Amino acid sequence: MIQDIYPHELHNEFLPNREAKAEDIVICAKGGSLMVSGEPGALRFPMRKELPEAMDCGYLFSMDEQGIYFATQEGMEPLPGFRYMTLRDIRWQLKGPLPSMYIAYTAWHLICWYRDNCFCGRCGHSTRPAEKERALVCPSCGNTIYPRIIPAVIVGVIHGDEILMTKYANRDIPFYALVAGFTEIGETLEECVAREVMEETGLRVKNIRYYKSQPWGSVQDLLMGFYCDVEGDPAIRIDKSELKEGVWVKREDIKGQLDDWSLTHHMMMVFKEGREPR
């Protein structure tokens, strides 16, 4: 999965006074895109020494010993040999290496948070970075804003030797996924699993068991994977506003997705190999 970068390690400690070195990476954003260069398998971000000396950079985290920063002023013209690309295009066209993809997704998560909270949602005053923790503080009313992390579930629904595979409505994605959805206020993760499966496919489920989690920074999610079993009638009745297809697929017929970076693909392959928790 995208976070499985061993022997590399991401360090997310809050170090507000760390200054960028010449070889450190700076993530430059423009709208919904990041400045990148490279060919497939050789994704690269600009280093501090390649950017204007006067550019302000904010520290995000480190990959091993290399600092990862972001350009606090967005929208600069791309450097020679670089271009702006969305995360989706970076994923499918440049295709790694994996540590660089993890940098891109995690940096995007934080950049969006800084961008979306430059003003206080309580009183409208400009916010400023907190001094002792990763947060934004309103100097007018004292409101403290922490990075947004959205809990969501990925669900492998099992019926005997088959798993439920779906395709989203209104999305141009050729491969299958699993049932997924966001957790509501006052709802447990297990209740979310049962509700999302019922709403999207009309199926009741039992034996809900947690499997694994994954940060997915492109949409600020923390994904939590569950497997469960159908209870009663296995007939699928899809919600066409959510899904355009829902089918039962036998283990041996599972093809998975185009890369192995997502929790969805990982859970499909675990079921294919018969290794899912019982």
Image: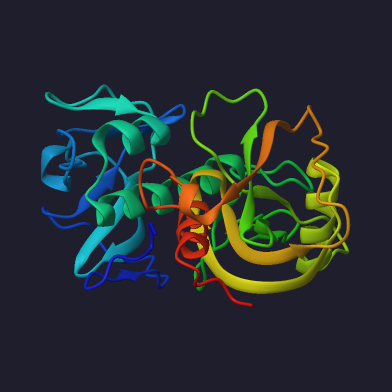
Question: For residue 148, what is the image quadrant?
Answer: bottom right
- Image point (21%, 73%), residue name: 7
Q: Is residue 128 above or below residue 146?
A: above
Colouring convention used in this rendered image of the protein = rainbow
Position in image of residue 113 (x %, y %): 55, 48
- Of residues 236 and 173, the one drawn nearer to the viewer in this rendering: 236
Q: Residue at x 72, y 59 (%)?
A: 143
Left or right of 61 in this view: 146: right
Which is nearer the eye, 109 or 207?
Answer: 207
* Residue 159 falls left or right of residue 61: right
Q: Quadrant of the C terminus?
A: bottom right
- Seen from the viewer's position, the closer of residues 157 and 199 is 157
Where is 165 relative to 231, above or below? above
- Where residue 80 appears, as percent x and y from the top left, is 12, 23
The image quadrant that residue 21 belongs to is: bottom left
Q: In the image, what residue occupies the spot 66% across and 54% down?
A: 138
Q: Residue at x 45, y 58 (%)?
A: 269
Please identify the quadrant where the N terminus is shown.
bottom left
- The answer to whether residue 118 is seen in the rendering is yes
